[in-house]
Each structure stands twice: as C-alpha cells, then as structure tokens.
Amino acid sequence: MARFDGMVRCGMRSILKLMWANIRRGKGSFKGIIILMMLMTFSFSGTVSNNDRLREAREQKFADAGVSDLMVNIYDDILTDEMLSSATEHPAVSSVTVNEALFFSTAVQINGEDNNMWFSLRADDGDTNVFTEDGNSFREDASLSDGEIYLPYKLRLAEGFEVGNELSLRTHSGYDEKFIIKGYYEDILTGATTMGWNYCVITPHDFDRIKSEKADKLGGESVCVLKVDWLHINAKDGISCTELRKQLSRDTDLISSANNAMTRDYFTDSIEMYSRVGTRSVGIFVMLLTIVMLITMYNSLAASIDLDRTELGILKAEGFTAGQISLVYILQYVTALTLGGIAGILVSVPACRYLIGAWKNITGIMTDTGVSYLKCGGLCAAMTAVSTVFILIATSKISRISPVRAISGNISDAHFDSRLDLPIHARPLSFFLALRQLGSRKKSYIGTVLIVTMLVYFVVSIMILAGGLDTDNLFYTIGGEIELTDMGGLNMSETDGIEAEIQKTDKNAFIEYSCRHNMLLDGESVMVHAYRAAQEVFKPEEGRAPKYDNEIMITRNVSEQLGKKIGDTITVKYKDSETDLIITGYFQTVWDFGYLSVMTTDGIKRSGLDEIYEAYIRLGDPSKREEVTDMLNEKYKGRLEASAFENSAYAEAYSKIVNTLMHSLTAAMYSVLLIFAVVIVNMVCKRAFIRERTDIGIYKAMGFTAGALRTQFAVRFTIIAVIGAALGCIISVFFSRKMITYILHVVGLTDFTSANRPLTFILPAIAISACFFAAAYISSRKVKTVEVSELISE
C-alpha cells in the first residue's frame, strides 16, 4: 500500500490520491488485471456477438420471408388432393401454401466433369438476395437470364463451383440442361452447411420448361427429374409447430407419406447449431477464467495486506478508517477491470468483423458484424460486482491491524516463517529448499494450486474434445469404388441378382446400399435409416444393433421424445403400413441433430419401404473397377448407371469447415489460456518475490549465489504447478467428458467418448509446469539487486 507523507484529510480526494499512488507502486499487478479482463471480455464478446447477430438476422429474415411453422417436402406424384385438403381443412391449420421444386436424382457435371453433388431447382421469385463478389453485401441487380443459375452461398467453398463455370444437369435425354453459374444467393432455409439440400435458382421460364418437358414419373425405370412440392403450413394461434406436426401426423396421411416434415424450429437449429456450440464452449471457458482471475485477485490482495501491514497501520493512525482503505483497493481493481473491459471490447470490434463475416460460410446468411456492447458491459458490471465482494472479504483483516503494533514493526502480528519442518539434503539442494518453503507456508500456495488445477483441466478437456471429434467417423456413410445412379426405384430384392453378376468378375465384390425415409414413430415424425454395409454405420452405445425385422435402434433424443426405452415396443407408420418394433439399443449421431432411428433392411422393407436411396459397389480387387463398371452399364443399360465413385465435394467441404472451426476454436482457447497463464504466473511470482526479499537477503548472507536462488525460486513454483497439474488431470478423467457432452448435446451427441491417451494428460501438465518455471525464473531476476546490507534495517 503506497502512502503519502504529512497530515491528510480522509476525504474522497485523499482516497483517490492514495489509489493513484498505489497503482504507480504496483503497476505490474494493475496491468495484469487489465490484461486478464481484456482476455475475458474478448473471449466473451466474439462468440456472444456472433450468436446475437446471427439470431437477429435469422429472425428478421424469417419474418420478412414469412417462414411457416411447418414445411413438408413431398413428391408431387404422391401428394393427392385428399392429402392437401385434409391439411388445409385441419382445425389446427390456419393456412397452407404450395411451392414447386425440381429434384435431380443424378449428380451434376461441372465443365463436363462429373461432380458428386445433387441439386434441386426452384424458380426465381424476384426476391432473391445475391451476394456481391466479396460476399460482404448484396447486388443491386439480381436479375437472371435463361441459361443462368444462382447457387446457395455455401457452395462457394466447394471445388469447381466458381462463377462462370458451366453446370450440367441430367435428364432422361442426358446432360442436356446446361447453365452458367452467375453467382451465389442467400438461402435462409436450406443454405446452411448443416443442411444436405442444394436448392439453386433459375428463371421461371427455364423452370416451367424443364417441369413440363423433362420431369419423370416416380417409380419409372428411368428417373432423373422429379417434381417436388413444398407445403408451407401455418398453425393457428396457441399451437406450437411441434404440436402442429404431431396433430397432422395423427389425423392425416400427409406426414407419413412425405419425404420430410420440418418445423420452423428445425431450420432455426440448423442455422444456429454451431454458434450454440461455440456459446456453450466459451461460456464455460469464461467461467473458468473468471474463477482463476478472482483467485488471483484474492491472493494478490491478501499478500499485499500482509506485506503492507506497517503502512496500513500508519494510515489508520493518520485517520483513515478500515472502510476507506478497503475503498482504495476497490477503486484500484475496479479501474483495472474497467480499463480491461474497454480494451477487450475495442479489440473485439475488428475481431468480430472478421469472425462474424466468416461465419456466413457455415450459415449462408448475411448478418451485421457489430459487437454486443450491452452484454459485454453487463459482463464487466457483473465482474466488478463479484470482484468487489471478493475485495471486501480479502480486506476484512484490515480492521484487525493495530496502528501501534504496525508502527512498532508489527512484531506481534507477523513472524518469520520457519523452514525447519523438512530435512535438507545437499543434492539437489534447490529442490529440498523449495520443499521446505512449501511446507512452511502451505496456505499461501493453495490459491496457486487451484489456478493450475483449473488451467490444466480446461486444456486437457480441449485436447480430449479435439481428439475425439474425428470427422471421418462422425460423418461416415457407406461407399465403395463404384457408384450406382439412375436406379429408377431400384428395389432391395433386385440387388442379389446384380451382385451375382458382379461376382463373376470379382468374387469378393459386395453391394452396399441404404434406404431412408421419414416415418412416424408413435406418432412422431422421425427419419429412419437402414443399411446393408460391410462396416457398421452406427455403433450402439448401449444395448445392441437390430438383427431382425421386428427390431429398431434409436438415439437417446428419440427415446426422450417418445418416452420409450430399450425393450419397449413402438409403432412405426409409413404411408398405409403400420408395424410394431422392439427397441434394442441406443446410438448417437449428428445427423438430424440426433433424432434418427435405424432398422435392418428386412425391417424397413416390412415397414413398407423397399426402394434404395443410394448404392455402391465395394470391390475385393479395386483394379477391376473399370471392367465391372463397363459390364454394369452394358448389361443394365436403361435400368441403372455405374460410375467411379469419388468422395462428395460437398461432404469434403463440410468436413473441412468443421475441422477448421474446431481447430480455430481450439487454437484460440490455447492462445488465451497461454497468455492468461503467463500473466497470472508473473503476478504470483512477483508478489512472492517481494514477500521474500528479506529471506533472500539472509540466503545471500549465508553464501548462496543469485543463480542458485533464482533456480530455487523457480523450482518451488514448478513443484506447485506439478501438484496442480496432477489434480487437474485427475479431475479431467472424471468430469471432462461430462462437460464436453453438455457442449455437444445441441448437435445430437449425448455421450461423448474419446480414447484417453497418456499424452493427452502429460502434455498440458508439462506445458503449464514449464510455463511456471520460466515465469518464476524471469520474475526472480531482481535477486541480483538484493543486498545483504538490507538486513541491517530489520
């Protein structure tokens, strides 16, 4: 505590002068708090501002576009007048609007080269927002001409879909529908990378021409283009979108016959999914940093009061009350917190402009890039309020300082800590001296141990998260060397004969396929998958995968939605078919946000679905790919088409986005933690050095060199770091997975699992310990300035 000489009047002016003198004396601590608060505000501002701007933009765009409560996607050949009227006249429905689209069942070509991506088309309605070349605004002129096409913004990242390239779509006449890519538009419903659809925009004239001349009938032998209807259904007041879908599922055949029936909330979740994950992650991160900073502040204050007891006693003798002295500390730290918060917000302005601007690569939606100043200010205010409470607790001991004892040297209130508790051995001397120092002053190091524990815990948790999110497994689906397309409603029963023909060329060849459709499970609309694959697509986390045609495996989200568990029976309805299935196990997936179920191929056929959604040939001898492909195209010409399978460009782009997102988030957290750790270690070590200046003089009088004392000082804090790191690793074993599961629950993962390798725990412990050693060694460089003559004043 700094002091100014002479008589003082203990008013606010004197308190402010004392505060300023205190700041000048302890600049390192003051700057440290500023830096810590800046890091916290910056971390908080980035994710919260991104989340707020995205939510505001999404709500406004949904309102402007009149997005309905329920959107049903159904083939035009399946939609009947009876279905439409049953929905229109339903007592829960206020309005129904039908929009047309065209679905192309074959992958597109770019500049004449095959590209493993499927498109759907809709007609330009005159309200299409098209991005400018830099992606930062919309074009004033978004008009289209025949032969031109706008792609959703998310395809800007996919290879080959550059403006000016030729995109070819296949009809029953071949790749005869050719369009020039003119730009990228804002698709507020299906434009997020979390959505599998790619709806592109063409002129109404081109759309009507293709619909009338090229559209095929569902179930025909050659199906390339299908008419799709989107029913936009609004509920009456007081009925939620989920309840609307449930009532329509119960009372009509529309939902069970549809490809999908998605609520407004589903599209909201698709757009905001990753921002919610970021908000949860950073929320926990900021909470950790807050606790660490509060412990650091408390320790710094407690140490300052112990060191300055004499000066505090003099201030009390001069007329300052304990409350006024506490107010000095409060003003000092509030000033530091305020400056740190302002600095954090200022740094966030350009950072948010970049982060939020880049986020539209994931959402496909244009948003503002402003900072959430009110929430950042709220964080600073909350931190100030909590810090004030901690400061009042830490400074409560000031009331017990006696001016008389303080002036007389404080002999009764403080004592020289004994270092005779533990034995000392010559080798290694620094280590045993450090142990004795720890043993004699255990309570003063508890806060530092807690700080290290939390830092290591969070670093380990980040490493577990990064190591467990394997996008290859997370987004795994079936595949092979050859892809079958233009199957025209190929049924599962037909694959045996095709596989037998293939095995004449390659006896180990195997056809992998999947069937999937939206079905009603106990009246709830849920996507159902079935696979014939060499590798298990979804591994059960509890129970087992279905083996028989009367079994089904569901996710925990579906279990909660239906109120059913393993061993229970559920009724599955698809069109006019109803079957009862037994739940055999739980699995988890990010597809459809974890609302998914899996049957056997026999089970889904029993439920009324026999059509194959996708099919691939996995060869035993890849060198025979060309031979098998030619055989299939010749023998089954007009029934299907075989081609070499390449990984989906969109899937690769999506996986790349997820990897980049996770790596960026991890790197940002590592960087903040590293800076945070360096600042805290520096503050703790400097305070310890000031406290032990007299002790260092005694050691020098006994013959210790400056280098030996610096090593001893650094070793002591390294031991503290090792103890805290060990505790952090132990806590991580029990709690990291639960924390990560909470963060990722919004994407559908209900039980995050990861192989806990030793390096996952060892590396953070070594890094933090090394950081403590280096910072302590650097902080102790002033050992050289301590003179033995300083002991005379004692």
Image (cartoon, rainbow, N blue to C red):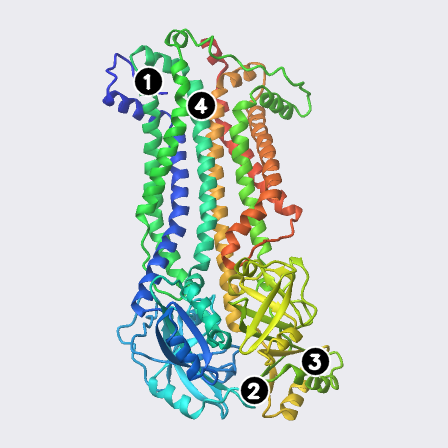
Q: Earlier in the sequence, mark 3 or mark 2?
A: 2
Label 3 vs label 4: CA separation?
Answer: 74 Å
Q: Is residue 672 above or below residue 395?
A: below
- Mark earlier in primary sequence (3, 4): 4
User: Few, some or many C-alpha atoms within 10 Å of disc 4 (few <14, some 14-19, many ≥20)?
Assistant: some
Secondary structure beneath label 4: helix
Residue 523 vertical placement versus 709 (above, below): below
The location of residue 652, given as percent across then percent down, is 53, 68
Cα separation, mark 1 vs mark 3, equals: 86 Å
Give the residue pinned by disc 4.
302
Residue 248 x %, y %: 44, 71
Identify the amino acid type marked 4.
Ala
Q: Which residue is mark 2?
A: 488
Between discs 1 and 2, the one toward the N terminus? 1
Circle on res. 3: 1
Q: Tell me the distance, in whole angstroms, between the alpha carbons under discs 1 and 2.
A: 89 Å
Tell me the element at label 1.
loop
Residue type pointed to by label 3: Ser
The residue shown at (55%, 31%) is 449
The percent position of residue 534, horizontal first and vertical second, equals: 69, 71
